[in-house]
Amino acid sequence: MVKMKLLGLAALLLAGAESARADSRSILECTIGHLPPIACAYIAGEALKPAVEKIPGAWDKFKHCTLSCQIGLVCPPVDTLLLGLGKEIVDVFGPGNAEWADLKADHYGTMLSLTPAIKNNKHCIKGCSMRYPLQK
């Protein structure tokens, strides 16, 4: 029963985001109110993820932190956290590996994005690398 409710929540979160993605709206358009905030977070994540994946030495927790921080710079923190939660729920039922530590890294990155000193993506990378050092 609990698994079905979690799966339903994940489907609901991702269904709204998928329909927004199909409209191919830009991050700017979704941040000024044309789309629900969770869809904005999904679109931002899809746009930012390739660059985070290419960072030399990036490992799973660093990627979670950095991507959450970068999404948090353009989307509401609650929706940034919900996106991370939705991803982990999907991982429970799919090919991914759901981990509590991933949610902790998402939380750290989201909170980092609320820090006044964090103003851009490079600041997110630096802040997250202090908590989750890049591997050599």
Image (spheres, grey):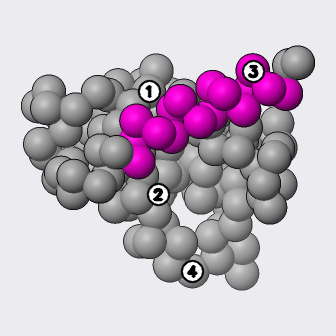
Tell me the kind of residue under disc 4. Pro
Nearest the eye: 73 or 128: 73
Quarter in which the N terminus is drawn: top right
Q: Residues within 10 Å of mark 2 (few under 14, many from 20)?
A: many
Quadrant, the C terminus:
bottom right
The tag earlier along the polypeptide, 4 or 2, is 4
The mark closer to the camera, 2 or 3, is 3
The magenta stretch is 3-18
Residue 92: quadrant of the picture: top right
Name the side, left or right, on which 42 lies relative to 28. right
Mark 2 to mark 3: distance in Å? 35 Å
Whether residue 41 is visible: no
On the image, which quarter does residue 74 sit in?
top left
Q: Secondary structure at mark 3?
A: helix
Distance, label 1 to label 4, CA atoms, is 28 Å
Residue bearing mark 2: 125
Single out the mark in the foreground, 4 or 3: 3
Residues at circles 3 and 1 in contact by the CB criterion of under 8 Å:
no
- Give the number of the mark in front: 2 or 1: 1
Label 2 close to label 1 by CB (< 8 Å): no
The residue at 13%/45% (across/down) is 28
Residue on which disc 4 sits: 56
Q: Which residue is mark 3?
A: 5
Q: Is residue 17 magenta?
A: yes
